[in-house]
């Protein structure tokens, strides 16, 4: 969870998405933070007894957005139009942007541009009360899970780009422990609920195996 980053004055790439205090989702977030504090990430991602899966996925999706927002915010000086003219995850994987609304046909663009499009798009989904209701009793739309899966699939690409193109900078900044813990938590979560297709995870497959094997 974003509490892993402590109270460091890290700049975020986009404004942090807050879950309203006093809401049920806020209580769920606190529960998740307490479980995470035990250090057992496999247990921390499990659906708490009696809770709604949609709500659990929503709370965690918001939190992963905030984590990636902070992580990418630390390396924006190194991810430029010059250093990253395409959005890639190593030499074999290149991502083109389309959101189906404003940009319907996938376009090739630089990594900073792609990540800006991506994080703005995610922010718009999270701010949509019909998709991510924050009030108790407001039902989730029937397509919620497919939207959440698309958000998580796209957020994975930011992790993939950071690991492949900017890990040296992450190490210089001494942020690798935060990055690894955040990514491990993300992977355990998407594996627990089968939220990202395996083929999408291929760019970081070796790392995923390394981070998750110890915890089987």
Image: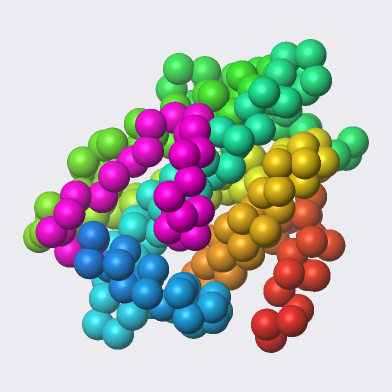
Looking at the rendering, which quadrant does residue 127 occupy? top left
Q: Could you tell me which residue is drawn at 34 percent across and 58 percent down? A: 59
Toward the viewer: 22 or 89?
Answer: 22
Seen as rendered, the residue at the extreme right is: 91
Residue 85, x across and y down, in percent: 78, 18
Is residue 149 in view from this perspective? no
In the displayed structure, does residue 192 sit left or right of residue 81? left
Looking at the rendering, which quadrant does residue 154 occupy? top right
Residue 171, x across and y down, in percent: 77, 46
Residue 83, x across and y down, in percent: 80, 20
Q: Quadrant of the N terminus?
A: bottom left
Q: Could you tell me which residue is drawn at 48 percent across and 46 percent down? A: 8
Give the vertical position of 8 relative to 43 (above or below): above
Is residue 127 in view from this perspective? yes
In the displayed structure, does residue 13 sit left or right of residue 145? right
Q: Main secondary structure of the magenta part?
A: loop
Q: Could you tell me which residue is drawn at 77 percent across and 54 percent down? A: 204
Question: Disc count in the image?
Answer: 0
Is residue 17 inside the magenta stretch?
yes
Is residue 58 inside the magenta stretch?
no
Q: Quadrant of the C terminus?
A: bottom right
Toward the viewer: 193 or 206?
Answer: 206
Q: How is the image coloured?
A: rainbow
Q: Could you tell me which residue is drawn at 60 percent across and 35 percent down? A: 74
In the displayed structure, does residue 44 sit left or right of residue 78? left
Residue 150, x across and y down, in percent: 50, 46
Seen as rendered, the residue at the extreme top is: 82
Q: Which region shows up in magenta?
A: 1-25
Give the vertical position of 75 relative to 23 (above or below): above
Looking at the rendering, which quadrant does residue 84 occupy? top right
Seen as rendered, the residue at the extreme front is: 8
């Amino acid at each position: 969870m974003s509490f892993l980053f402590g109270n460091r004055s890290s700049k975020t790439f986009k404004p942090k998405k807050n879950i309203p205090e006093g809401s049920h989702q806020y209580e769920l977030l606190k529960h998740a933070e307490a479980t995470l504090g035990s250090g057992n990430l496999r247990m921390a991602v499990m659906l708490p007894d009696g809770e709604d899966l949609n709500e659990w996925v929503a709370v965690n999706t918001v939190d992963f957005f905030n984590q990636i927002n902070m992580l990418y915010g630390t390396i924006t000086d190194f991810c430029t139009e010059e250093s990253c003219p395409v959005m890639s995850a190593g030499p074999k994987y290149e991502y083109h942007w389309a959101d189906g609304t404003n940009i319907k046909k996938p376009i090739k663009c630089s990594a900073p541009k792609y990540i800006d499009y991506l994080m703005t798009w995610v922010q718009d989904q999270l701010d949509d009360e019909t998709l991510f209701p924050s009030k108790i009793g407001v039902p989730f739309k029937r397509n919620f899970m497919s939207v959440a899966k698309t958000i998580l699939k796209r957020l994975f690409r930011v992790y993939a780009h950071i690991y492949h193109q900017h890990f040296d900078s992450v190490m210089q900044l001494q942020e690798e422990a935060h990055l690894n813990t955040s990514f491990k938590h993300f992977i355990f979560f998407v594996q627990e609920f089968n939220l990202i297709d395996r083929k999408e995870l291929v760019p970081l497959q070796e790392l995923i195996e390394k981070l998750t094997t110890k915890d089987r």
